[in-house]
Image (spheres, helix red, strand yellow):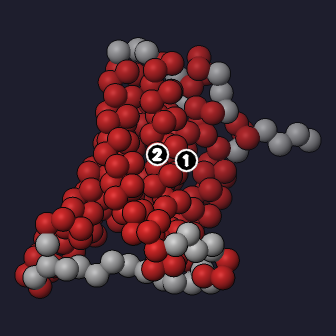
Amino acid sequence: MEFRPRDHVPLLTAVCSVLALGLVFGAATQSIPTTYVPHPGDAVLAAIPHLNAAFSLTAIGTIALGWRAIRRGNVARHRALMGTSLLLFAAFLTGYLWRLTLVGTTPFPGPEVYYRYVYLPVLAVHMLLAIVCIPLLFYALLLAATRPVAEVYETHHRTVGRIAAPLWLISFAMGVGVYAMLHHVF
């Protein structure tokens, strides 16, 4: 019996989501041994947050344009823009996890009142949305990647995409806000 990914999208979504979130939580809890991660040098580690902000801002644009393209019926442009968004997210996540594993979290440099009433709520919502987006994105991606375009319309891709795209946009925007508070505002 042949294994066809298109017949197992929920299972593949679950496996990919668990692996991705396992990496994130492993890096966040410093559970990944640094001996497994190459050290790129202090200059590269210092540049990662700034590169990630650029990736995030660019992804906000590509997600918004991809959403607009599909609303106008331009499937090819939608696919290209959402694929670009996914690559930007992968680049962001690679840099984020690399730095997080080697350096750990960045301490908040501002006053306690901003930390408690602005930074932490924004960070918490950003993290929650990012966690929720992972399985939604994998599901929508796997539905689109395992079917011809004509068949995608018969799946839940559109419904999931309508939920995932705005959450993804908000998560990226809040991530840029977190970056700004950590590296520029204070």
Which of the two residues, 35 or 129, is positioned nearer the viewer here? 35
Answer left or right for 158 relative to 147: left
Q: How many marks?
A: 2
Spatial CA distance of label 2 from label 1 is 15 Å
Which of the two residues, 45 or 160, is positioned nearer the viewer here? 45
Q: Position of residue 98 (x, y in %)?
A: 52, 68
Determine the secondary structure under disc 1.
Answer: helix
Answer left or right for 124 relative to 91: left
Q: Position of residue 159 (x, y in %)?
A: 42, 35
Quadrant of the rendering where the N terminus is positioned: top right
Please give the residue where the numbered disc 2 appears in the rendered image: 88
Q: Give the answer, above or below, for where 131 lies relative to 87.
A: below
Taking the spot 50% from the left edge, 52% from the top edge, the residue there is 91
Taking the spot 65% from the left edge, 21% from the top edge, the residue there is 148
Q: Give the answer, above or below, for where 143 lies relative to 77.
A: below
Q: Residues within 10 Å of mark 1 (few under 14, many from 20)?
A: many
Taking the spot 65% from the left edge, 27% from the top edge, the residue there is 147
Q: Give the answer, above or below, for where 84 lies relative to 22.
A: above
- Amino acid marked by disc 1: Phe
- Sooner in the amino-acid sequence: mark 2 or mark 1: 2
Answer left or right for 65 relative to 114: right
Asked which quadrant contains residue 171, the reply is bottom left
Which of the two residues, 58 or 128, is positioned nearer the viewer here? 58
Q: Residue furthest right?
A: 1
Asked which quadrant contains residue 7, the reply is top right
Question: Is residue 78 something that shows in the picture?
Answer: yes
Disc sitting over residue 7 in the figure: none
Please give the residue where the numbered disc 1 appears in the rendered image: 138
Q: Give the answer, above or below, for where 38 lies relative to 65.
A: below
Determine the secondary structure under disc 2.
Answer: helix
Taking the spot 59% from the left edge, 17% from the top edge, the residue there is 150
- Amino acid marked by disc 2: Leu
